Image: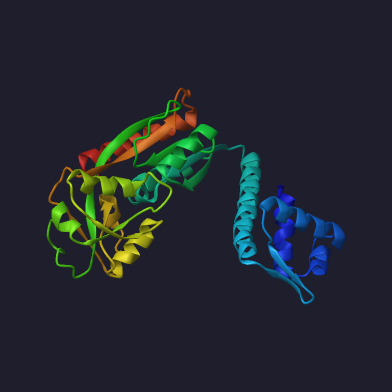
């Protein structure tokens, strides 16, 4: 499958008329029709319903259209960024991160790096597992996550351990207290992300499992913000890293846990064996200051 097949498909899906689509694509109708049929054969399903009244997307076609548009948009953004980087003679530096680390000091690292005229910064939200693969593939240069993952090609450094806190619906009986895990376990639990796994969800589940506490996972969310929205709706509670309390969300209250030893690490991942580039050395220097400030309780 080539990008042109996706472009052809998206135009046909928008026009729902092969003649009009062919005119937009500056080609004749028969070759376009053949390309669409070849695409359906490669995907392995019918994407369009064909009738005397024209074309209509099948449910599979609607799904494929949504993702094809995202792919084409990503390609355009990548091409545009590459051209800008080439014109400015900047070096691309990729940063992967899980959302929960972006409420603390990571934005300060990003802000400081963006001030460097020689750096074209690329940010990508991804799980720790995805960061490991992206590092090995060269798509990012450094990653910030929550999990320790053993991989011979990647080195990981725990920057600091961060306390976990509970996010409760406002007015919850535990609001204003420091609940134990046993008290939390008696409440419906929301975990995130639902996939891919392993993830922060498994960290939280492991906390209760190690204490042999039975829990009721009432909902799995793909994103932190979704989990907080579910909490605000009164569906359940969730555990989040301490940094997240900076997010003032209506309907959500945060409480510290009775057990202060319940923490989650902030893990920095880099390719093993790489000689640090000048940009990586800059990033490491900025990161050291930020981590020292975090450990000493100073927040610049």
Answer above or below: position of 83 versus 25.
Answer: above
Give residue 111's position: percent from left, percent from top.
43, 46
Answer with the quarter of the image where residue 27 lies. bottom right
Q: Is residue 118 visible?
A: no
Give residue 62's position: percent from left, percent from top.
62, 65
How many numbered circles does the render carry?
A: 0
Left or right of residue 8: residue 134: left
Answer with the quarter of the image where residue 286 lies. top left
Pick the residue in front: 79 or 299: 79
Left or right of residue 49: residue 166: left
Pick the residue in front: 265 or 130: 130
Left or right of residue 120: residue 30: right
Answer above or below: position of 248 versus 164.
Answer: below
Give residue 8's position: percent from left, percent from top.
75, 58
Q: Can residue 186 be seen in this view?
A: yes
Pick the residue in front: 218 or 280: 218
Answer above or below: position of 211 versus 27.
Answer: above
Name the residue at 43% across, 31% down.
Answer: 270
Give residue 278's position: percent from left, percent from top.
48, 28
Name the residue at 21% across, 49% down.
Answer: 208
Name the residue at 30% across, 36% down.
Answer: 159
Left or right of residue 208: residue 221: right
Q: Tell me the colour scheme of the image.
A: rainbow
Pick the residue in front: 21 or 220: 220
């Amino acid at each position: 499958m080539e990008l042109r097949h996706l472009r052809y498909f998206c135009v046909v899906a928008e026009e729902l008329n092969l003649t009009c689509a062919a005119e937009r694509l500056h080609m004749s109708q028969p070759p376009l029709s053949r390309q669409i049929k070849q695409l359906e054969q490669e995907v392995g399903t019918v994407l369009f319903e064909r009738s005397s009244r024209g074309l209509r997307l099948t449910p599979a076609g609607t799904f494929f259209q949504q993702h094809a548009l995202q792919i084409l948009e990503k390609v355009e953004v990548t091409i545009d960024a590459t051209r800008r980087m080439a014109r400015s003679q900047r070096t691309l530096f990729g940063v992967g991160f899980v959302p929960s680390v972006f409420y603390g000091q990571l934005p300060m690292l990003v802000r400081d790096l963006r001030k460097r005229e020689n750096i074209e910064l690329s940010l990508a939200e991804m799980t720790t597992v995805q960061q490991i693969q992206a590092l090995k593939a060269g798509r990012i240069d450094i990653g910030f996550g929550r999990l320790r993952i053993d991989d011979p090609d990647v080195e990981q450094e725990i920057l600091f351990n961060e306390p976990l806190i509970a996010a409760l619906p406002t007015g919850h009986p535990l609001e204003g207290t420091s609940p134990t895990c046993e008290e939390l376990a008696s409440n419906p639990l929301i975990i995130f992300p639902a996939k891919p796994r392993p993830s922060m969800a498994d960290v939280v589940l492991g906390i209760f499992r190690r204490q042999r506490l039975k829990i009721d996972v009432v909902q799995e969310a793909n994103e932190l913000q979704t989990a907080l929205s579910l909490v605000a709706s009164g569906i359940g509670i969730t555990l989040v890293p301490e940094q997240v309390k900076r997010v003032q969300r209506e309907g959500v209250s945060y409480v510290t846990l009775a057990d202060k030893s319940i923490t989650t690490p902030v893990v920095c991942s880099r390719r093993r064996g790489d000689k640090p580039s000048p940009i990586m050395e800059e990033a490491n220097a900025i990161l050291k200051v930020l981590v020292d400030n975090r450990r000493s309780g100073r927040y610049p």
